Image: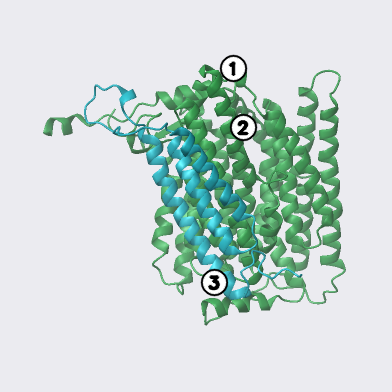
Amino acid sequence: MELILAIAIGVVFGAGIWLILRPRTFQLITGLLLMSYAVNLFIFAMGRLWVGKPPITPTPDIDPSQFADPLPQGLVLTAIVIGFATTALYLVMMIGARGLTGSDHVDGREPRS
Amino acid sequence: MNALPWMQHLIVAPVLLPLIVGALLIPINQKRYPLKFALGLGSTLLLWVVAVALLLLADGEHWPDGIGVYLAANWAAPFGIALMVDRLTALMLVLTATIALAVLVFSARRWDRVGVSFHALFQFLLMGLNGAFLTNDLFNLFVFFEVMLAASYGLVLHGYNLRRIQAGMQYIAVNLVASLLFLIGVSLIYAATGTLNLADLGGRVATLGAQDVWLLQIGATVLALAFLTKGAMWPLGFWLPTAYASASAPVGAMLVLMTKVGLYAVLRVWLTVFGDQAGALSGFGLAALTLGGMATLLFGAIGMLASQDGGRMAGYGAILSSGTLLVAIGHSGSPVLASGLYYLLGSTLAMAAFMLLLELTERLLPPGAAMLAITMEAFAIEDKPEDPVGVGIPGALAFLGLSFVACALVITGLPPLAGFVAKFSLFHALLAAAPAPLPATTWLLIALILVGGLAAIIALMRLGVRTFWASGVVTPPRLLFSEAAPIGALVMLCVLLTVQAGTVFDYLGRTTEGLMRSGDYSRQVLGEPPVQRLPDLEAVR
């Protein structure tokens, strides 16, 4: 399971890196989204992988090794919310740039060919 | 113990106050400028008072070791988020509030009207900055960085025009990627150590197994990449000159401060985590920081000489000062660091004043009215912002010229102002700290700092000559008092910093000595007891 997850994160992140190096804003934002998904999965995996274990318990006397780590789950939620908000902000700005410059190139003008 | 004494609550005030005021400002109609300005100014003034109070508390005998801790939501330290104030934090808070006050007054008559929600965004920016200085938790640091950046995205675009959009696209994209790196670094550090509390990390580093040490080192390096992107270390700082040159003057002045936040974060994390408690890992990566700082100095010097326009020059000036600071952090012995912090104070104040000043000197040249027109169209703002040509102050040209010279003196490090004191003490400390036959790197370092200063002198002199002597101005521009006063105040602060250098250095000496004892942080932060429930409430239940 670790190997599959690691490869999946790597592929998604790699695709994101390739996309953010492209010149069009749509490719850029898709790349940013892919990278942020990969990072969210990565944070999640850093709490170690568990199957079918609850993250919290009402009883005080427990064996912690039988429970999933709740902190990465909290971190990942926060990261998703923040990533979503900043990406949405960037989308608004892209639309503004498209309207003002009339080009969807990241430099705001078409390259001279 | 029942309730917290009020002094403890002051620690969280620099975060809460701008948050509340910023939220209040959003629903107020855009046309009620005076009310919005008054609220923003009131909040910033109060922030300044709180920051000074915290400085006095941290430097006094009030808290043991000068470290005050506030447990958010009353969770004990490694489990909840702890806010912490020490002398360095208090100093940065005062610096932030001072510059914010000057910038806000500067923008009162013109810049807060060219776009929407300037004041609300400004308050959120302050919240992010203050939070980043105060927090003692890595993930919380990420959250405050994002608050600060989100506000800065809005502010960089403030006064929406083509140039700002083009620069904003790059600025935002670079910072979004840096935020992802930040997250990767934080989660790697968590995976290696199982904690995100900085003070707790400092205590645990020495006890890690070999595999976890690897993970921690990779995590810390990735995290440093994110910080140094903000702090503009070469080769991560290419976004900076364009962003500085295109941002509006008040935002540019705040960007100067934001660049310093990245360096502050590096300093804070490195001294707490890889400090004297870290055992074998103590001082990890500091040599890389020094090398990076040297490359940054060179890059800044070349860029300074190459740039024509004032805004870009200021951007490369900021890169130069980042380089000098990185070198000081890399050498983090106590006296070198104290000189570095003194340099930070002087250069930040002078750069902020310089960014504001550039906008006024541009009025000497033909007016850039076209830039404002696009804004009006985009936001359908009917009434034009008041023409800056209002009640003039006498001797405008002399004021501009003198302020320009003063800023240039501090930035380049020429006597008699603060920049010279900072560089002189930095050299002194570097030479004193080096082993007896001086290593070549120390010589190279001193040479690079001097070359950087020389490049700055040449570039600024060229700019000054072109602006003041060769522009063929016949009538001096008319300045508003509210625009001239903040610049004058910032310049006077630089002068005060020079006159009171002894007092400031005493304080900075205490600051750095405190920073070197990372064990104090672990003890104070982890030892802070949560507030117990009131006994009569227990009885009612």
Residue pictured at 45% horizontal, 53% vertical:
B18
Q: Which quarter of the rendered picture does the N terminus of chain A lie within?
A: top left
Residue B421's spot in the image, x, y percent? 76, 38
Quarter of the image where one finds residue B329: top right
The Cα atoms of the two marked residues, 2 and 3, are separated by 40 Å
Q: Which numbered disc, 1 or 2, marks the residue closer to the eye?
A: 1
The circle drawn on residue B279 is: 1
Local crowd size for mark 1, using a 10 Å CA cut-off: few (<14), some (14–19), many (≥20): few
Q: Which numbered disc, 2 or 3, marks the residue closer to the eye?
A: 3
Asked if disc 1 and disc 2 are in contact, CB closer than 8 Å, the reply is no
Q: Is residue A77 left or right of residue B395?
A: left
Judging from the image, what secondary structure is the residue with disc 3 in? helix
Kind of residue at disc 1: Gly
Q: Tell which circle, 2 or 3, labels the residue nearer the N-terminal end.
A: 3
Query: Same subunit under labels 1 and 3?
Result: yes
Q: Which quarter of the rendered picture does the C terminus of chain A lie within?
A: bottom right
Query: Same subunit under labels 1 and 2?
Result: yes
Residue B180's spot in the image, x, y percent? 54, 46
Q: Which residue is mark 3?
A: B113
Q: Which residue is mark 2?
A: B507
Residue B381's spot in the image, x, y percent? 52, 79
